Image (cartoon, rainbow, N blue to C red):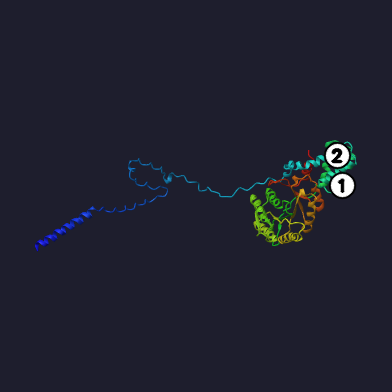
Amino acid sequence: MEILILIIAIAVVAVGAASGLVIGGRRKKALPPPPRETPTLTPGRSAAPAEPKTGDEAAPPAEEDVRRTIEEVVLPDGDTVVEVSGPPLDVPEPTAGRLVRLRSRLSRSQNALGKGLLSLLSRDHLDEDTWEEIEDTLLTADLGVAPTQELVERLRERVKVLGTRDPAELRALLREELLRTIGTDLDRVVHTEPGVSADGAELPGIVLVVGVNGTGKTTTTGKLARVLVADGKSVVLGAADTFRAAAADQLQTWGERVGARTVRGPEGGDPASVGFDAVKEGISQGADVVLIDTAGRLHTKTGLMDELGKVKRVVEKHGPVDEVLLVLDATTGQNGLVQARVFAEVVDITGIVLTKLDGTAKGGIVVAVQRELGVPVKLVGLGEGPDDLAPFDPEAFVDALIGD
């Protein structure tokens, strides 16, 4: 029995020893390192560098950035204001003398007329054939039949009385007669005087711009805004041409260049409503002038012309319209007179704007359209530049016509 107990004890000891060897032979599993503490950052200071990895101990420590105390930091002046604004506004050229500055552009296209007349008048013998040539030259320039006959008759009489062939005297004579034909005593001012609205508020000057598609009407409206801004007036634009999608965008671009607000409506909306709202906006802003660009109506479309009359009537609920400017393309010549007559029947035209006058030798249209409508040419367009719209000056025009 004792021997059996001893054998069991030896076996237990042997098994325990074997278990110890197995346990002792196993590698302990490495525990994850404790998380590093995140340093607390002080405003304006960077975090401390990370502890070096294996092998980094041999590298020299990096130099720390030079730090300044709060007393060493120079702060901006408290009165300094940082302005955030859009693109700078254009500064339009002054209108005084603008036509004189553009004279060379005008004379390039008109000199043929003036030089042709002077050449004919300087002939040694002015017979009937010569006077017929003079008459044809004036008719070709779109002066019109009646004005041409009157001018030729006066020239014949004065040349006969003076009996001169001196170029300087002939030029002075022709200049005088052309000025008389064009008219120097007409009121060519674009009137934009403030008034009083129906409810007693101060009313800005109201200008309607009308004309056929393709005459440069919307562009002329934008350029006219520049003319008024150059004269020190504040302007509100009304984009009442709701039938052309690009018309309102184009007008708004012109307005943004000089700081003029543009009132517009939905595409295909009521033009009269836009015109009414534009004047209302002008009253609320205290603007000096409201320019309303109407749709470029074909003069053959009776319904559209009636709508133009509606725009004027609705706008006049605020107060009277100061100007109705008809834009005509000078290159169309006598065809423009047909348009002018129809527009004059719908709205009371008070002034004419002749565009593209630098692109035609038919400067006589100035006389013809004035004679047809009984209203003066007030503005002329002489190029594609933003400041190429000029108040019409008869003397500068005639001087460009006949040259020096």
Residue 260 vs 113, above or below: the answer is below
Viewport quadrant of the C terminus: top right
Q: Is residue 160 left or right of residue 373?
A: right
| Residue 202 lies in quadrant | bottom right
Q: Identify residue for label 1.
A: 149
Q: Earlier in the sequence, mark 2 or mark 1?
A: 2
Amino acid on which the number 1 mark rests in the picture: Gln
- For the image shown, how many numbered marks are present on the structure? 2
What residue is rendered at 76% in x and 48% in y?
Answer: 331
Q: Residues within 10 Å of mark 1 (few under 14, many from 20)?
A: some
| Residue 237 lies in quadrant | bottom right
Q: Residue 141: image x %, image y %?
A: 81, 45
Residue 287 vs 174, above or below: the answer is below
Amino acid on which the number 2 mark rests in the picture: Leu
Q: Residue 307: image x %, image y %?
A: 73, 61
Q: Is residue 28 left or right of residue 311?
A: left
* Element carrying mark 1: helix
Q: Residue 221: image x %, image y %?
A: 70, 52
* Residue 95 vs residue 11, the one in the foreground: 11
Q: Which mark is residue 218?
A: none
What residue is rendered at 72% in x and 44% in y?
Answer: 98
| Residue 275 lies in quadrant | bottom right
Q: Identify residue for label 2.
A: 121
Q: Are marks 2 and 1 in contact (CB under 8 Å)?
A: no
What residue is rendered at 87% in x and 47% in y?
Answer: 149
Q: How far apart are the alpha carbons under marks 2 and 1?
A: 16 Å
Q: Is residue 126 left or right of residue 391?
A: right
Residue farthest toward the bottom in the current orientation of the protein: 1
